[in-house]
Amino acid sequence: MSKDLLAEATRALRETEPVGDLEARATRSRVMTGLHQTRIRRRTRLAFLLPLAASFVAVSAWGAASGKARLVLDRIERLVGVTVVSTPGAAKAPRPRLAASPAHSTPSPEQAMLAPNREAEPVPAAPVAAPAASVARATASPKPSPGQAERADPTFALYRVAHTAHFVDHDPARALAAWDAYLNAAPNGEFAPEARYNRALSLVRLGRGKEARRALAPFANGAYGGYRYAEASALLERIDP
Amino acid sequence: MTIFGLAMVTEQALAGDAELADEFVLRLQRAEPNAVAEVYDAHHAAVRAFAKRLLGDAASAEDLVHEVFVSLPKAVRKFRGDSALRTFLISIAVNHARHHVRAAQRRRRAISAYGDTKSLESSDPEREARRKELAELLTRALDGLPIDQRVAFVLCEVEERSSREAAEIVGAPEATLRTRLFHAKKKLRLALETEGLR
């Protein structure tokens, strides 16, 4: 009985009267309107997004080629009040120096400014990394080995020589010559701002006040954004003309 | 792309020409209004009938039909031509049916709560009343089934499609479909028996 009832009900459902022509036409209009709106939305999206994407690509390319992108970003960061802590090896461009740790011994202000801050200095392919840097590296993509990096950019070797003379051997005369060599080879190189600042420090240590003032002036004038701005200004006040 | 698949779109337009068939699918992908309109005119009745039988509610069925044809330009990218376009449209309807089933159930509950009964206009009022009553009874019983079993029952029993075609529509093996149908019928018999005795 129940089987017959199911069969009968199924037949009844199958014989459901067709929807009127009016409803079918109304739905057809809705479909056409929906498609039209979809096309308009897609065109509007393209018309809006394509020029935007093209402008972004063009500006990024120009900024990367002219080296101004970093400066613009630094200025924006200063305006917004946001600073990004960069890792030594990964630093593409200069960043403001971090505040000195209170745990360190407190040298005189000039000494403090002249003292190299190893954590803030970019060391291309340095064999030993600071703990913070190693944490950052663990999350970042793998870095090329020293040999690879130097093969990719021969000026890295020059930077390395200057870095060793400045930070390891503490020989300002040799460091100055090495910084000059690096800057001659790569005036717009990846570490050119750091090299210029370290060169200025070498001049200060050698007692060549006039040249040191000239070298520090761009940093104190904000030509490199916030990078070494405060240190350069403070040094300029203390250096004899 | 087989011609068989698209031959049912518009017989005059395609006329067994593979290049025309491909061109037509491209036009559909570009959401060309004329192409979608052609498909609508050729197949809306079949899609609507299936939607009405599956949902048991005319308004929800219209919404489902609308959704099927609006989403056709995007969905047709997956169309390989190894089945008829009509079958493909029904499979789009199946994929979009889930939330329409719920909407139709809500509407039915609301109508029954307000005690709305449709007027009977037929040359044989008694027979028509019985038919409607049974159809409504079955639709309510279908509400108690999982969507997969519901689709299997409507495709195989109400629309009298072969299990092979129904399996193709739902994208499941034939054996799975037959199992779903078996369970659906078992539950429906029980539900109808209970409802019928009230």
Image: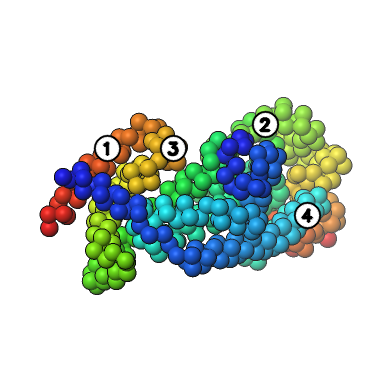
Neighbor class of circle 2 (other Cα within 10 Å; few <14, some 14-19, many 20+) is few
- Image quarter where the N terminus of chain B lies is top right
> Mark 2 highlights which residue?
A144
- The reply to whether label 4 and label 3 mark residues of one chain is no
Which numbered marker is on residue B165? 3
Q: Secondary structure at mark 2?
A: loop
Cα distance in 3D space between marks 1 and 4: 63 Å
Q: Is residue A64 left or right of residue B132?
A: right
Instruction: State the image quarter where residue B137 is shown.
Output: bottom left
Mark 3 and mark 2 on one chain: no
Q: Which residue is mark 4?
A: A58
Residue A62 in the image, given as x and y percentages of width and height: 80, 53
At x 39%, y 62%, the residue is: B58
Q: Residue at x 23, y 71 (%)?
A: B115
Q: Identify the residue at horizontal 30%, vertical 39% (top origin).
A: B181
Do pointers 2 and 4 mark residues of a single chain?
A: yes
Amino acid at pointer 3:
Glu
**Camera-side residue of A214 and A83:** A83
